[in-house]
Amino acid sequence: MKILAVFAGLCLVFLFVWERVDMVRVGYHVERLKRDKVSLERERDQLRVKFSSLSAPDRIAKVASEKLGMVLPQPGQVIMVRSHPESIPPSRVVPEEVRVAKSDWSGGRR
Amino acid sequence: MAAPLSRGRRYVVLLLLLCGFGVVLFRLVTLQILQAAELTVKADRQHQKTVSLEGARGSIVDRHGKMLAMNLEVPSVFGVPNVLDSPARTARFLSPVLHVRTDELERKLRQDRGFVWLARKLDPEQGRRLEQLSMEGIGVVMEGRRFYPKGPLLSHVLGFAGMDGEGLEGVERRYESHLHGEKRVAILQRDALGRTVFPKGLAEQSPAPGHGLVLTIDEVIQYITEKELEEAVVQTHAKSGTMIVLDPQTGALLALAVSPRFDPNAVSALAPDRWRNRALTDAYEPGSTMKAIIAAAALEEGMMKPHTMVFGENGRWSIANTVIHDHEKLGWVSFAQVIQKSSNIGAAKTGMGLGDQRLYRYLQTFGFGQRTDIDLPGEAAGLLKSPREWGRRSVASISMGQEIGVTPMQMVTAIAAIANGGVLMKPYVVSEIRDAQGRVLKQMLPQVKRRILSPKTAQEVTAILEGVVTDGTGGRAAITGFRVAGKTGTAQKIDPQTGTYSTTQFVGSFVGYAPADAPRLAMIVVIDEPQGEAWGGTVAAPIFHRVGTQVLNYLGVSSTEPVKLAMAMGGH
């Protein structure tokens, strides 16, 4: 009986020590995961800044004009058309703006 | 068998043991009870680390959610001079990575101090290179740095944040209390190797980030405005230029450009003059653009009708011992033509017909001499003297846009009131304040300041101002397919040397709106000291035309006037 009590006591001590050690181990693990999270968040933010810089209008305009040879449409090349479907009473229709590029409606001529 | 200890020896051993235990007990009491508080503090200091945490500064986006300003965690490098063996060698090693001169680094590292900053808020790439270096006495900490990914775009509205993350100019300054993150001190547990083991109060670690702002600005309209203004300032060799694009129905600012621009990512080397928002801070004599306001007042008062005939004095009129000249020698012309031909004499006669009190009241009602209350810092009220301080010629001068100082923002809000049918709106630049999760905390709605004209008067003024573009001085502002209303202005600047009007320094401007029948844009262009021809109709109206054409196209506004298809067929 006495031996059993001593054994149980030792088990409790080991359990306590194991629990404390494991807590520290998990603590290190949590800390490492937090560092990873912070690092990934930093990377995400850096990519966000890079994306925003690359999508800046002046860069897009430069690439469009210098690399792709695009030009601004001249007056009359873009025509806005209001569409009023006949099936619906006009009072219930919110006028819809439709953009028609010159190159689209003239059979693709440029 | 050993002989038993004598009684005396046993007492001596007992006494020694007692003394030993006594010393231990005394020490125990001293450490555990008497010095307990002091030692607890010392122990905590060794295995706890106190760090100051600050939530990330809120981001700023345009009305379509395009990023304009955001925070990044970037490395800052510090040195501990006391533990360095060779400051010279360390400085040589760090110099190419930090892009700081070797002698400057060495000077810092030779200081008799325990901590010194070597370089703060470096680029992320430099941080990666620094991570590979492991040097005794050199440390790296992460700090929040403000980034403006679009560079100079919208710089005069955004402003910038300082080294410690506080807003110093523009929206960054005006909304500092919303943008900055929460500041908090946290305690971390660390082991013998200095590694963080277990943070106390784990859930309370992260301080709340600042709130984000959604602007009324449209990034694309802003780009078009800046590009066209910049080109015009370069072409005319002007000192500077300002342009504002406003939604006349709501007062929402769509674009605000000041040339020359600056990059808010690198402001330290620039003079404050470069980041001043001239659209709000600089008052100028508006010249003939003021005639649009005078016309509105005269029509509202019923003093004039568009067809009322006015004598132009053949271009020369003496008043208060001075002579007023017109660019064009006019005889009898209609009141509408007075504005369309920009007659100084006609405007002076109209102002004098109104009288000083009524003129002053209308100028105040239109918002001159007071701030527009736009949500940006540093706004000036302009200069509008009380009639008590006016001279004999003041009524005539003010009617021609002299003896009065207005800011471009005041002028464009006044013209927007004519555009929208007579209501003065409060201009604004921030439409929403959001939390870090994107939930709307506060929404700014358009605010009416007051009604200043009847819709009928506004319509009459619009018709007259359309004539300025179709038959008058503002022909170059015309936009194909749209009706445009506006007014040119060319004002002489005061020569600081003589205190009189300069014959070489001018301010050319154009203010107007389009489409005139259903206005979507109210715009002002101000070109300061253009070289060569300085007429508002020559230097400013073409910018109005170019920006208006592109922006109406971008917004998908249908043409209200017939478009010549022959142009379309022949164009590229």
Image (cartoon, coloured by chain):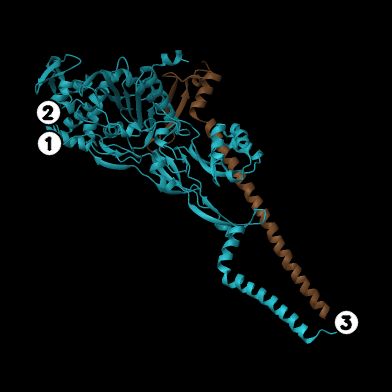
Q: Which is more N-terminal, label 1 or label 2?
A: 2
Of all chains, the one bearing label 2 is B
Quick one: SS at disc 1?
helix
Quick one: SS at disc 2?
helix
Marks 2,1: beta carbons within 8 A = no
**Residue under disc 3 on the same chain as residue under disc 1:** yes
The residue that mark 2 highlights is B352
Quick one: SS at disc 3?
loop
Circle 3 or circle 1, nearest the eye: 3
Q: Is residue A78 left or right of residue B405?
A: right
Which residue is more in the foreground, B170 or B286? B170
Q: Is residue B168 left or right of residue B451?
A: right
Q: Residue at x 70, y 75 (%)?
A: B20
Q: Which is more N-terminal, label 1 or label 3?
A: 3
In terms of image quadrants, where is residue B301? top left
The residue that mark 3 highlights is B2
Residue B347 image offset from top left, x and y in percent: 17, 24
Of all chains, the one bearing label 1 is B
> Which chain is rendered brown in the image?
A
In terms of image quadrants, where is residue B546? top left
The reply to whether residue B520 is visible in this rendering is no
Which residue is more in the foreground, B490 or A87? B490
In terms of image quadrants, where is residue B80? top right
Drawing shade for chain B = cyan
The residue that mark 1 highlights is B388
Which residue is more in the foreground, B377 or B567? B377
Q: Amino acid at mark 2?
A: Met
